[in-house]
């Protein structure tokens, strides 16, 4: 996506076309700001030739501080050396004449590449990122988060994404997204040892959002027959085919979950602000330390985080011995959207729950966790329970 600050009343379709597909026009600096806030992964702003120069430079210098990965390309009717110097000083990446469409396209492409490097995004070269959403307590919101994260990566971030339901016994990804119940992961069993991209593709359910899904089996017998080795093999294939593989999991360290965790690049660890859930997360974190899953890959999510029931975020972090990165508020709109089979990130993208989930999606793309909404960490001595080692 690119944001095009276009206040001209003239015909700017050709310019928009040169900027690239998926251009969103905004008619004022205020609307631009809102769009930038709503899209933490946004990488490019193009300012039209008719927009006041001082205003354009103010926008560029503001984003240079607030969002260094966001490139600003400035269009002007005429360009001279003094203008270029002034623009670059303000933080504009490139200045291009508005009637030079190939130059606009090239400048936008270069700016996107710079942003991608700054965000640590490298083009997909057959090594997608595996993200496991985990919590050792049921009902915390794993499935809700996994579905919305996957849909956000697919529909909003436009990354080739698959959601794998590894809650083999009670998986509800299929029913939540209104998908047919077969085929399932169990249908990969006859292919074990020789599973390839074509084999896996035969088991995939496409969802309307652009997301692909692999579903949990239908019967307990099938569940028991699925070994960790099959999951390992399947994820290794999926990693070569997708930018992101998002895994929903059961609330337990089963063989298949451990197989997924071993291959994961990031771990979305979900808790709610209540003592049993926090205690379970604490045990999970200790287990992660023992298993050697690096702390830099942990992404702690506090779901229903506005229902603190007397707890404070500082207490929670002290008790966990780790930072909470994303706080998702409680809202009945989550189940309401879910019941209609529409994840909240696409049903109502401006909803506070959707914005928090979108931030989580941006984090997968390498944005600094501190910048995308970590809660304040206070070094307080009072803990909910002690870190015992
Ligand atoms: N932030 C939230 N606000 C309100 N309801 C939520 C929220 N997150 C999850 N839920 C609801 O809580 C229930 C359990 O969530 P789910 O994602 O199925 O948990 P899990 O997969 O961890 O068992 C679901 O009905 C879901 O709609
Ligand atoms: Mg679940």
Image (cartoon, helix red, strand yellow):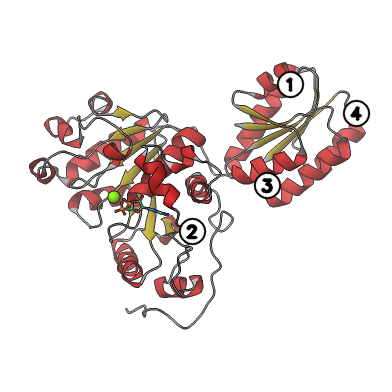
| Residue 80 - label | 4
Residue picked out by circle 2? 327
| Image position of 179 (left or right of 368) | left
Find residue 198 and report its horizontal and vertical position in percent. Answer: 26, 23
- Using a 10 Å C-alpha cutoff, classify the residue at mark 2 as few (fewer than 14 neighbours), some (14 to 19) or many (20 or more): many
Q: Are the two marked residues, 4 and 1, in contact with CB atoms closer than 8 angstroms?
A: no
Q: Which residue is located at x 49 percent, y 70 percent?
A: 313
Residue at image mark 3:
68
In front of the other: 185 or 207: 207
Please tell me which of labels 3 and 1 falls first in the chain: 3
Whole-Å distance between the Cαs marked 2 and 1? Answer: 42 Å
Which residue is at 45% across, 69% downward? 308
- For the residue labelled by badge 4, is the local secondary structure a helix, a strand or a loop? loop
Badge 4, how many Cα within 10 Å: few under 14, some, many 20+?
few
Give SS at disc 2: strand
Which numbered dot is residue 358? none
Q: Nearer the viewer, residue 238 or 283?
A: 283
User: According to the image, label 1 marks what residue?
Assistant: 103
Residue at screen point 51% across, 41% down: 348
Q: Which mark is in front, 4 or 2?
A: 2
Task: Choose between 246 and 199: the one closer to the eye.
Answer: 246
Q: What is the CA distance from the residue labelled 4 to the residue labelled 1?
A: 16 Å
From the viewer's perspective, tell me whether residue 175 is left or right of residue 39.
left
């Amino acid at each position: 996506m690119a944001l095009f600050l276009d206040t001209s009343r003239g015909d700017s379709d050709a310019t928009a076309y040169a900027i690239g597909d998926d251009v969103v026009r905004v008619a004022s600096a205020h609307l631009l700001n809102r769009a930038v806030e709503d899209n933490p992964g946004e990488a490019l702003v193009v300012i039209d030739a008719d927009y006041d120069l001082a205003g354009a430079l103010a926008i560029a210098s503001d984003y240079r501080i607030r969002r260094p990965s966001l490139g600003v390309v400035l269009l002007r009717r005429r360009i001279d050396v003094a203008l270029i110097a002034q623009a670059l000083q303000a933080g504009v990446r490139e200045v291009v004449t508005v009637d030079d469409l190939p130059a606009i396209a090239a400048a936008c492409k270069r700016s996107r590449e710079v942003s991608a490097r700054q965000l640590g995004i490298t083009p997909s070269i057959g090594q997608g990122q595996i993200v496991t959403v985990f919590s050792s307590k049921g009902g915390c919101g794993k499935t809700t988060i996994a579905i919305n994260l996957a849909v956000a990566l697919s529909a909003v971030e436009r990354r080739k994404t698959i959601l794998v339901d590894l809650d083999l016994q009670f998986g509800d990804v299929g029913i939540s997204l209104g998908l047919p119940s077969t085929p399932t992961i169990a249908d990969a069993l006859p292919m074990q040892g020789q599973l390839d991209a074509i084999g896996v593709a035969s088991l995939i359910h496409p969802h309307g959002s652009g997301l692909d899904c692999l579903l949990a089996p239908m019967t307990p017998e099938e569940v028991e027959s699925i070994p960790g080795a099959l999951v390992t093999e399947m994820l290794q294939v999926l990693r070569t085919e997708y930018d992101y593989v998002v895994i929903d999991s059961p609330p337990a360290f089963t063989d298949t979950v451990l197989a997924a965790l071993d291959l994961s690049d990031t771990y979305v660890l979900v808790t709610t602000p209540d003592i049993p859930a926090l205690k379970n997360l604490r045990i999970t974190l200790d287990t992660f330390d023992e298993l050697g899953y690096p702390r830099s890959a942990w992404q702690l999510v506090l779901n229903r985080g506005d229902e603190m029931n007397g707890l404070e975020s500082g207490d929670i972090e002290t008790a966990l011995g780790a930072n909470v990165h994303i706080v998702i508020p409680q809202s009945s709109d989550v189940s309401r959207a879910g019941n209609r089979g529409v994840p909240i990130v696409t049903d109502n993208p401006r909803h506070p729950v959707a914005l928090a989930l979108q931030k989580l999606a941006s984090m997968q793309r390498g944005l600094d966790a501190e910048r995308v909404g970590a809660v304040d960490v206070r070094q307080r001595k009072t803990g909910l329970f002690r870190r015992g080692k």
